[in-house]
Amino acid sequence: MGRCRRRRGAVSRDRPSNAKHVKPEKSIRTCDSAFQKSWVLGFRLPQRASLLPPLRRHSKNKTIIKTRQNPSWSLPLPAFFAIPISSSPPLHPSRDRARGGGGREEEERGRGGRRQKPINFLLCAGGETRGPLFHRPGSDSRQMAMEITQYLIAAQSPDGTVRTTAEESLRQFQEQNLALFLLSLSVELSSDAKPAESRRLAGIILKNSLDAKDAIRKEQLTQQWVSVDQMIKAQIKESLMQTLPSPVSEARHTSCQVIAKIASIEVPRREWPDLIGRLLSNMRQQNASAILKQATLETLGYVCEEISPKDLEQEQVNSVLTAVVQGMNQLEPSIEVQLAAVKSLYNALDFAQVNFENEMERNYLMNVVCDTATSKELEIRKAAFECLVSISSMYYEFLDPYMPTLYNLTANAVKGDEEPVALQAVEFWSSICDVEIELQEEYGGTESGSSDAINHHFIEKALPMLVPMLLETLLKQDDDQDQDDDIWNLSMAGGTCLGLAARTVGNAIVPLVMPFVEANITKTDWRSREAATYAFGSILEGPSVETLSPLVHAGLEFLLNAMNDQNVHVKDTTAWTLGRIFEFLHSPTSSFSVVTTSNLPRIMSVLLESIKDSPNVAEKVCGAIYNLFQGYEDVVSESSMLSPYHGQIIIALLSTADRTDANNSRLRASAYETLNEVVRCSHISETSNIAQLLQEIKDRLARTITLQIVSSDDREKQNDLQALLCGVLQVIIQKLSSTDETKQLILQSSDQTMTLFLQVFACRSSTVHEEAMLAIGALAYAAGPEFFRYMSEFYKYLEMGLQNFEEYQVCSISVGVVGDICRALDEKILPFCDGIMSQLLKNLSDARLHRSVKPPIFSCFGDIALAIGDNFEKYLPYVVPMLQGAAELCSQIDSQDEEMLDYGNQLRTCIFDAYSGILQGFKGSKPDLMMPYAGHILQFIENVFKDKNRDEAVTKSAVAVMGDLADALGPNISTLFKDRTFHMDLLGECFESDDDQLKETATWTQGMLGRVLVS
């Protein structure tokens, strides 16, 4: 077995939240491919082998699925289990932007990157409206097809009335005859005689008729396409293929994407068997134009992006790669063809596992990519380095023979190439760091005989040459780099890579960096001082505390003085470095803690003064204060060294949050987040400060409710501020309610607090709703049964939260608050249970709700059952089938999909939570109600035991439910254990664990089973 390959983006890690520079979202088109022995046929291996590197792409692949509100629902049907829980791979919204090629974003944007107005059209030449262009319902769709050009042109009219009428006409056309509608769009797109405007919009509409970012909508569109008549689909596909040689670039580009969208539906179903052959035949034509070859290669790349390697036969993969590599040949006269080929290879790399395992094919591939990285064309070099970055993460285990060449290529690019290429060269080394860090974390630095654990220690071997190269990049700052969040330059990339290298090799990096720090830290040039400080801050994670502590103690006073530097960049980086020092070398329980009673007054004086500096510096100071207080979070005492400064820090943070000189809300958010940490880490002696803060925050929240709102910006600012204030109140409530001595401070003003929260709900902002809901959960926990008096007024907002499918995070939090309230009210929750249970069951049955919300609903069932005891009986016929169906779903999860494995573990843990709560709820009065389901529960536990992908949380929950079964049902379950031995093996595994809680749970379960299984 070869080591597990990483999909692009899997090893990229963003700078921590307190990082000096937060790297903007950058990614490049990603997809993938694989080829085998036969692909080499027809190639002549070049005599010269040169090898090159790529760039660090910090892809943040987040797919936020927005769904619509819940309409009707039928209680008994457990439709949740019919919903595939595996969603499509995350899209990469920024990759086309990074590559400079429209891509997915174009589905919503027109020329120039502007968001396309909704489809509307009527205007003819001269701005006149012609005839009955828009048909009434029931009009002939074939006539509409003949006039679709006019519709598409009018759809882009600046006249809102025209646009709206046109949209309605197109919508009617689509609803009346979808097949003809799609065919008309494809014909419009393929015709060079049609206006560019209508072709562009036809392509956008066609693409959006096949794909959507929302997984549910995407599946609906897929089924919609599948249902279209085969002959119509064949005509549409033929029209698209005929568009590839079009001289109109926008039409070609859109057709490439639409072909790929159709391929994503049909190729996995084996419904377009000749697609790859058709495309490759374009490349084999003797007189094929450069336009046709470029479009074909682009299409191949997009197709590889949309499908999985398992969807193509190896022979097809080999042919694709052959065509792509031939297109990369520097003898190819067309620059556009070469560039398209390199980008296509980038998307095809995931298919190349078999080919990288073959040494001859691997050598040829690496030679081609590295030769291409020396192209005279900037975009081609950049794209080639991107391929090398991807190769470094996906095929790390094969790189050893090529590393000398790769080092030379990256070094030359960093030192002498243009920044886009140099960035990719640094990214190559950051990607190598990511892989080796992951290997160390997975295998603890030990080498095993398995090839899965190969760690070549490339960073350690290259360190003497790599570190000087990275240090040199630190001197290439931009003058305004701290002012623009979108800037990502060579200095930032170098600092990121240096930090990753420190994490990779630890102490070995310190002697290589410190001479640079010492030589530059006192220079008159601000760039030298900033670079030196940045270098020092970057290596504070990785090396041991023992190694760094003397250096930090020696340099701390210098850094504190540097907070008065004349240059704002130096101060900004110094504040960031101080924050890193407090994060990694500040531990009050350690003998190496950098903060002492002697230097603390100086530290606090500098921080309290520097928080008044420019907004960027103040934000970093907030981070430093955050880390400073966090060091005392686990210290159990009535006070800490920071107690004398507690009040001053709170005042300073409140003043910082009120600053009006910041251009964005980041400083205010940082101030309040730091305030939250100060509260969390406070001690008994600081209670009076927290009590005063409680009233101050409530006063601030009350003032936001009466703010005059005259614009959408005003509303947004109000919502943001309310969310931050509700967050602070949540933390204060949790802190003060944690002890009986301070809980009264919350209870005595709970009426006022709850009134404020209810007023905040009236804003109807999802962000505010979310934060206020969390704060109410904390208040319910603090108030206990007394919270009942707020339920009649609060329930309507709770119900709204449970119905909020659009902002599914709000729905998820509302589910959690139901659990909080159940634990607070116990049986007093009963009057509201019918409504809550009905909504929760609806949510499980509704395909539109994001899957992440569904497991917590099962846990919530357990909370409700535990609270209302045998009153849960009437819900049992609906809940248990849901639980059984979810358990069945867990057995179908793809073991190769790490994201789905995590989801499966979460789902199983929550199923066990539900069973545990139900069993305990019925235990005292009606335990026999669960006897019919006991066999299924036990089988589920056994299936989980056999699954080696389960995590410890699942194991702990499974063992606990096994004990609950014995405890609630008693000797009645003894027959279920007849001829079963798995429970003994499961308990034995638990007793060998290092987790004391797991051992304790297993001991209790063993006792329960011992009572009921005695002969």
Image (cartoon, rainbow, N blue to C red):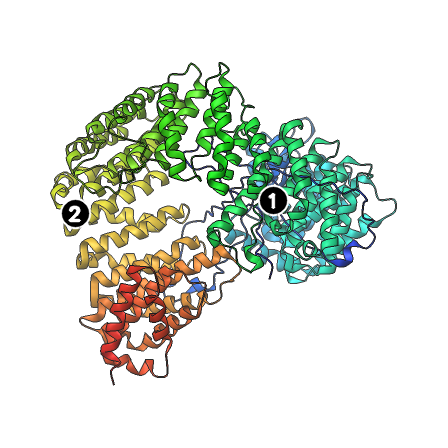
Q: Is 503 on the left or on the right of 812, as rendered?
A: right
Going from N to C along the chain, the mark reached first, 2 or 1, is 1
Question: What's under tag 1, amino acid-wise?
Answer: Leu
Q: Is residue 20 visible?
A: no
Location of residue 800 in the rendering, given as x and y in whole percent from the top left corner: 32, 48
Q: Quadrant of residue 314?
A: bottom right
Residue 974 drawn at (x, y percent): 28, 81
Instruction: Please say if 1007 is above or below 605.
Output: below
Quadrant of the drawing holding the C terminus: bottom left
Q: Secondary structure at mark 1?
A: helix
CA gap, disc 2 and disc 1: 56 Å
Dot 2 falls on a residue whose secondary structure is: helix
Mark toward the viewer: 2 or 1? 2
Quarter of the image where the N terminus is located: bottom right
Q: At x 37% / y 34%, what residue is drawn? A: 549
66 sits left or right of 987 in the view:
right
Viewer-side residue, 658 vs 596: 596
Q: Is residue 670 above or below residue 959?
A: above
Point out which mark residue 783 bears: 2
Q: Residue furthest bottom?
A: 1015
Rendering coords of residue 41 (x, y %): 81, 55
**Which amino acid does the dot numbered 2 rest on?**
Ala
- On residue 711, which mark appears? none
| Residue 704 picture location, percent across and down | 28, 29
- On screen, residue 760 above or below 600: below
What residue do we see at 61% from left, 45% from top?
392
The reply to whether residue 473 is visible in this rendering is: yes
Q: Which residue is mark 1?
A: 170
